[in-house]
Image (cartoon, grey):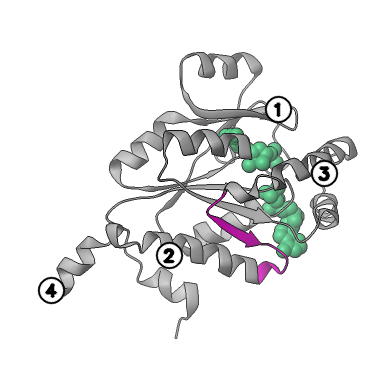
Amino acid sequence: MKRGFEALKARWTPPDLGALFVVSGPSGTGKTTLLQEAFRSIPGLEFSVSATTRAARAGERDGVDYHYVDHEAFRKMLATGALLEHAEVYGNFYGSPRAPVERAVAEGRSMVLDIDVQGARQVRVAYPEAVSVFILPPSLAAIEQRLRARGLDDDAIIARRIREADEQLAAAGEYDYLIMNDDLASAHTQFQSVFVAELLRRNRRESWVLASRR
Ligand code: ADP
Ligand code: 5GP
């Protein structure tokens, strides 16, 4: 018998109305790791692919992890209003393309934005109903260990990300939900529970009530 999120996935029905999720946390906290499992476990969640001026890391794919663009192209997107939000993070520019998010919201699909705290503030203004989730590391030392173990950034980049982690952590109080990513299995369950609970809100499940009374 399937249990937990495997059972949920087998019989999941999409909500009547989609939700917009914002996920933030310092670099190395585990956002990508947790999101990958959430996408595997909960059907119908879509990832907002950001544009960035940072170089692709080993294993990253253009159009899947990010749209990799140069400064000129990024400036053009900004000038034409093509970005819903944007920020300079750890010395690179990042922004969320507006059109896919607007289309998802209009069509009742659920979208997840993995963005920093400055971007999250801009999304809250544009979409006050967005649900925001902050991933906490057990300590700053743990972030450093994880970034080193990940082995994808050089020492200078890692040092910068750790220096700026505290600035991101100071904004945790602005978020609707906090996830503690100490033990990974526990964090997966915490994280997926937030998505599931939000997608079970009454206003997103009117059709269940109607069906149950037929
Ligand atoms: P982010 O997307 O927030 O920058 P990642 O998901 O890339 O972070 O995680 C950074 C590194 O830490 C990866 O190598 C990942 O496998 C590892 N990691 C994630 N969560 C945990 C955890 N709970 N315990 C130990 N290592 C973890
Ligand atoms: P990384 O370079 O490690 O993929 O991401 C660095 C930081 O940039 C992370 O905190 C991530 O959430 C943030 N980020 C990624 N895409 C966007 C975006 O489109 N907008 C904003 N504001 N931040 C982003």
Name which quarter of the figure residue 126 lies in. Answer: top left
Q: Mark 3 and 1 residues: CB-CB less than 8 Å, in contact?
A: no
Which comes sooner in the sequence, label 3 or label 2? 3
Give percent across and percent down for residue 113.
Answer: 52, 43
Residue at image location 39% in from the left, 50% down from the top: 19
Please tell me which of labels 4 and 3 falls first in the chain: 3
Residue type beneath disc 2: Ala
In whole angstroms, how far apart are the C-alphas of marks 2 and 1?
A: 34 Å
Q: Is residue 63 visible in this depiction of the protein?
A: no
Compute the Cα span from label 4 to label 2: 23 Å
Query: Amino acid type of disc 1?
Result: Asn
The residue identified by callout 2 is 197
Name the residue carrying label 1.
Answer: 92
Task: Give the residues drawn in magenta, as a range.
Answer: 175-185
Q: Could you say where residue 43 lies in the image, as x and y percent from the top left? A: 41, 59
Q: Is mark 2 on a helix, strand or loop?
A: helix
SS type, badge 3 = helix
Where does label 3 land, which residue? 162
Spatial CA span between label 3 and label 2: 32 Å
Q: In the image, what residue occupies the spot 70% across and 43% down? A: 168
Q: Is residue 147 magenta?
A: no
Dots 2, 1 in contact, CB < 8 A = no
Mark 1: secondary structure: strand
The location of residue 54, given as percent across then percent down, is: 70, 29
Q: Within 10 angstroms of label 4, few (less than 14), some, or many (20 or more) residues?
A: few
Query: Label 4 amino acid?
Result: Arg
Splitting the image into four quadrants, where does ligand 2 fall? top right
Q: Give the mark nearest the N terminus, 2 or 1.
A: 1
